[in-house]
Image (tube, helix red, strand yellow):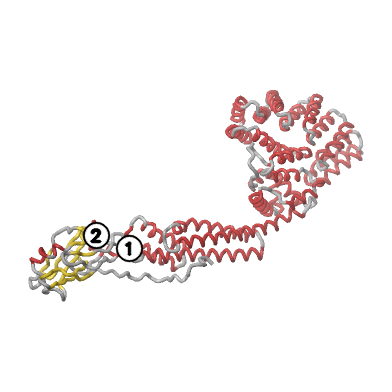
């Protein structure tokens, strides 16, 4: 429970009236050896003891009346005494005299005797909330105080205090705190407020009780939520713990003015609140670790035969490598679930099957892993991927090995990605990984952030298909930084989309001259030449590319070119000895192998090749697979 070291017996008592002494006796006259006393009291302007607050607020002066008592010379005063004795009576606060605003005024009773004398002092000079004394030639009175209901702002703050009391009674502790805090904060500016009878109760009871009671309720909520989580170990219970911890943080900000005040117990309460918050966050972290272990066990033990596992690993690889723009490397970023929105078919599939929430939960736990360790997959998951490496359709293990090293060893990071490029058969995944490799290159070329920003501005325009603006941006960049390859590539890509194929080809060649390992412009060049029927000329381009990058994609392009040239035996050799050897899980290579065998009239081998696509991925292959098999059947009969 909160406030373990403080006695928690603060009582909820309605504030009792503070005693104010507004009357005292003093010696006013000396005659021989005799001294005569009188009574002096706070009064109205005509000497009445009862003064209404409304009446007093309209006064320009503060009035005190002197009247005879049992120690007086007589039961009335002489006219001469007003000048001789009562004019000599002074009001002092903090040793400073406050001058009278008028000469003493005597009031006559029914017997035509002066039975009271009224003294007046300027209200603007009297600090009503501070004690004062009267001093004359022969005596000094005891200290007097004026009742707080006569203070200037009393009735402004009394309703606030009463509202705080009501809120406290209704156990609305945050509202109590926020309400009463107004009194305490204003008291730091206006000292008068600290002298109100309800101030101490506001600052030392209502305020502290509001903090203590609400903190206790949060602590109890956390205990209950933690017990519920340990019983269920599910995401809804974990989310509830998150909400309570966030509420604790929010309330710490609300209560901070009190914690920072020089009030009884405020520093101790602050220490205790921080302790409660630390305990809550520690429990939260432990619960996250427990839940993370439960959730991530799926990735630690399952294999690619389970479609859900295959789908999740593939999506995670795409989310991890997804990079719309270039960046200067600075460690591993958390994954954004919104990235799945760019993969609409995959998202629809997750929702249709009912796995979307499961996937989001895994992403949340992996983000926890990234924040804790800087790595995306723990050792158990990586060991499982290593075990399954021979069955993966894409270079998942190499991808996750790479990103596990991003925060610690960027050279190893890029080496793993280059290994992954070798047997990647998915163009989107391939180009995503290349964006990271390009980012690595730019990072170590000491490229300025402003230049990277300009390049990325152009890339965003390309992604938005704002072709004219993008062309203008990259045209400028290629002049400013003409030894950087990506701007030349993107300018060529823009021109390619605008059917300016010769200009595009020139830009791609320029990008390749700067960075020969650049895959993206080569793929565009291959498409350009293939679509224009320049297949004979394409083969040397592919051979050159293979000398630089011996990757599946370039071998597959070589197989396509050989097939287009009707060099079927060479096509088979290229597919079987290179493409399938690098990655045996591409349906495209087996469809091309089937087409090649069909062109060679080897129908049984063609059928086996087509059937292999259905074994690899029946969901992805089924439409084309059915058409190919029908064509094969028709031709072979």
Q: Considering the image in quadrants, where does the C terminus appear?
A: top right
Mark 2 against mark 1, which lies toward the viewer? 2
Residue 317 appears in the rendering: yes
The residue nearer to you, when weighing 552 against 610, is 552
Identify the secondary structure beneath mark 2: loop
Q: Position of residue 68 (x, y in %)?
A: 15, 72
Residue plotted at (88% across, 41% down) = 607
Q: Residue furthest bottom?
A: 70
Rate crowding at label 1 as few (under 14), some (14 to 19) or many (20 or more) other CA atoms within 10 Å.
Answer: some
Q: Which residue is mark 2?
A: 95
Report the residue at 67% width, 41% height from top: 322
> Residue 403 appears at what percent x and percent y?
70, 44
Nearer-the-camera pick, 88 or 68: 88
In the picture, the disc for residue 195 is 1
Looking at this view, is 517 or 468 the one in front?
A: 517
Whether residue 40 is situated above or below residue 423 in the rendered picture: below
Q: Locate residue 504: give its quadrant.
A: top right
Side of 46 relative to 612 (left or right):
left
Is residue 60 visible from the viewing direction of this image?
no
Q: Position of residue 279 (x, y in %)?
A: 58, 61
Residue 190 lies, in percent from the top left, at 33, 56
Residue 134, disc: none
Whether residue 122 sits left or right of residue 329 in the image: it is left
Q: Quadrant of the N terminus?
A: bottom right
The answer to which image quadrant residue 394 occupies is top right
Secondary-structure class at tag 1? helix
Determine the image quadrant of residue 150. bottom left
Mark with earlier residue (2, 1)? 2
Real-space CA distance between mark 2 and mark 1, rounded to the nearest whole angstrom: 20 Å
Q: Circles 2 and 1: CB distance less than 8 Å? A: no
Does 239 sit above or below residue 65?
above
């Amino acid at each position: 429970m909160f406030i373990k070291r403080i006695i928690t017996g603060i009582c909820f008592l309605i504030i009792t009236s503070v005693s104010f002494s507004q009357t005292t006796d003093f010696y006013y006259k000396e005659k021989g050896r005799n001294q005569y006393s009188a009574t002096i009291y706070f009064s109205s302007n005509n000497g009445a003891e009862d003064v209404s607050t409304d009446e007093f607020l309209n006064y320009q002066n503060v009035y005190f009346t002197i009247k005879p008592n049992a120690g007086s010379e007589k039961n009335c005063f002489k006219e001469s005494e007003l000048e001789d004795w009562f004019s000599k009576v002074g009001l002092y606060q903090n040793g400073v005299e406050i001058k009278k605003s008028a000469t003493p005024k005597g009031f006559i009773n029914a017997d035509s005797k002066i039975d009271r004398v009224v003294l007046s002092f300027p209200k603007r000079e009297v600090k009503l909330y501070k004690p004062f004394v009267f001093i004359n030639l022969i005596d000094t009175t005891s200290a007097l105080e004026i009742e707080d209901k006569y203070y200037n702002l009393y009735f402004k703050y009394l309703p606030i205090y009463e509202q705080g009391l009501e809120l406290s009674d209704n156990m609305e502790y945050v509202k109590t705190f926020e309400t009463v805090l107004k009194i305490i904060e204003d008291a730091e500016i206006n000292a008068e407020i600290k002298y109100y009878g309800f101030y101490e109760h506001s600052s030392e009871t209502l305020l502290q009780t509001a903090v203590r009671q609400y903190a206790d309720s949060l602590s109890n909520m956390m205990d209950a939520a933690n017990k519920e989580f340990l019983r269920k170990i599910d995401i809804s219970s974990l989310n509830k713990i998150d909400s309570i911890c966030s509420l604790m943080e929010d309330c710490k900000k609300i209560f901070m003015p009190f914690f920072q005040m020089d009030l009884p117990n405020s520093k101790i309460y602050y220490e205790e609140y921080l302790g409660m918050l630390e305990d809550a966050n520690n429990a939260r972290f432990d619960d996250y670790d427990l839940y993370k272990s439960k959730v991530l066990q799926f990735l630690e033990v399952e294999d690619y035969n389970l479609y859900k596992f295959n789908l999740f690993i593939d999506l995670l690889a795409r989310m991890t490598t997804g990079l719309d723009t270039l960046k200067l490397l600075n460690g591993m970023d958390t994954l954004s679930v919104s990235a799945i929105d760019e993969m609409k078919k995959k998202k629809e599939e997750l929702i249709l099957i009912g796995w979307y929430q499961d996937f989001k939960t895994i992403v949340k736990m992996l983000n926890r892993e990234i924040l804790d360790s800087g790595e995306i997959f723990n050792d158990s998951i990586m060991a499982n991927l290593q075990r399954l490496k021979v069955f993966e359709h894409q270079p998942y293990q190499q991808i996750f090995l790479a990103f596990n090293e991003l925060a610690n060893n960027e050279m190893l990071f890029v080496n793993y990605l280059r290994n992954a490029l070798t047997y990647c058969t998915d163009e989107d995944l391939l180009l995503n990984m290349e964006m990271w490799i390009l980012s690595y290159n730019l990072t170590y070329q000491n490229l300025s952030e402003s230049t990277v920003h300009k390049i990325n501005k152009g890339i965003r325009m390309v992604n938005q298909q704002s072709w004219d603006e993008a062309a203008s941006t990259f045209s400028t960049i290629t002049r400013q930084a003409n030894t950087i390859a990506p701007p030349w590539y993107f300018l060529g890509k823009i021109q390619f989309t605008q059917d300016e194929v010769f200009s595009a080809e020139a830009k791609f060649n320029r990008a390749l001259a700067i960075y020969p390992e650049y895959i993206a412009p080569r793929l565009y060049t291959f498409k350009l030449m293939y679509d224009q029927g320049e297949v004979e000329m394409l083969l040397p381009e592919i051979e050159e590319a293979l000398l630089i990058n011996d990757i599946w994609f370039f071998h597959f392009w070589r197989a396509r070119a050989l097939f287009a040239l009707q060099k079927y035996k060479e096509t088979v050799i290229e597919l079987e000895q290179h493409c399938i050897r690098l990655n045996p899980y591409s349906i495209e290579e087996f469809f091309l192998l089937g087409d090649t065998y069909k062109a060679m009239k080897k129908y049984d081998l063609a059928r086996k090749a087509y059937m292999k696509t259905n074994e690899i991925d029946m969901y992805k292959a089924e439409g084309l697979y059915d058409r190919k098999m029908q064509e094969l059947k028709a031709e072979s009969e």
